[in-house]
Amino acid sequence: MGTFEIARTLPADPEATFRVLGDLAAYGQFQPLTRISASPGPIGPGWSFVAHTGVGPLSITDRMVVTQWDPGEHFTIVKIGPVLDGGAEVHLTPEGDGTRVVWREEIVPRPGWIGRRTALLTDPPMRWFLGRSLDQMAARVGER
């Protein structure tokens, strides 16, 4: 896997959009076969969560920590293994009556040399998966 970027314009101001995109503990609602275990307390730098995606022995555990947190504008998440490296950068900017969201994701299975060699095969479905999740978040933003 590798690095890819998805951009969407969501139908709300940056603060309302951030309330949905920044609710990291709720991501299991937007990603199929995923459940989230989150740290207690408010989200900010150092806050961590774990996404368990899959069924039974075919599950992947993805541990992540928030490294930057600027509500209404930007957040960054770093993957801390043991299966995946990489992370996500999410930027929000006002655009007309909505918010332009640019989500840049890097997903590299460990060991990295294997993950980078499989990027041509794995990036298209991962881009679709992330785009689908972002579209579902956009629908939630529109409901609020």
Image: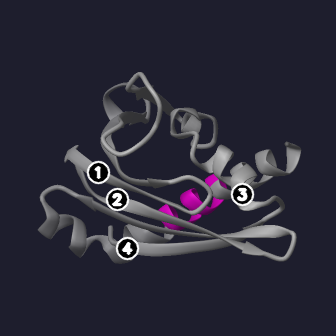
Quick one: SS at disc 2?
Answer: strand
Q: Earlier in the sequence, mark 4 or mark 2?
A: 4
Tell me where residue 37 appears, x and y as whole percent: 41, 25
Give the CA distance from mark 3 to mark 1: 23 Å
Q: Earlier in the sequence, mark 2 or mark 1?
A: 1
Q: Amino acid at mark 2?
A: Gly
Q: Amino acid at mark 1?
A: Lys
Question: Which residue was labeled with disc 4?
Answer: 3
Question: Which residue was labeled with disc 2?
Answer: 87
Q: Main secondary structure of the magenta part?
A: helix
Q: Earlier in the sequence, mark 1 or mark 4?
A: 4
Question: Which residue was labeled with disc 1?
Answer: 79
Q: Nearer the viewer, mark 4 or mark 2?
A: 2
Q: Earlier in the sequence, mark 3 or mark 4?
A: 4
Give the CA distance from mark 4 to mark 2: 9 Å
Q: Nearer the viewer, residue 70 or 103?
A: 70
Q: Earlier in the sequence, mark 3 or mark 1?
A: 1
Q: Counting other residues with Cα less than 10 Å from the Cα at mark 1, is it few (<14), some (14-19), or many (20 or more)?
A: many
Question: Which residue was labeled with disc 3?
Answer: 135
Q: Earlier in the sequence, mark 3 or mark 2?
A: 2
Q: Quadrant of residue 20?
A: top right
Question: What are the residue bounds of the magenta stretch?
Answer: 125-133
Q: Amino acid at mark 4?
A: Thr
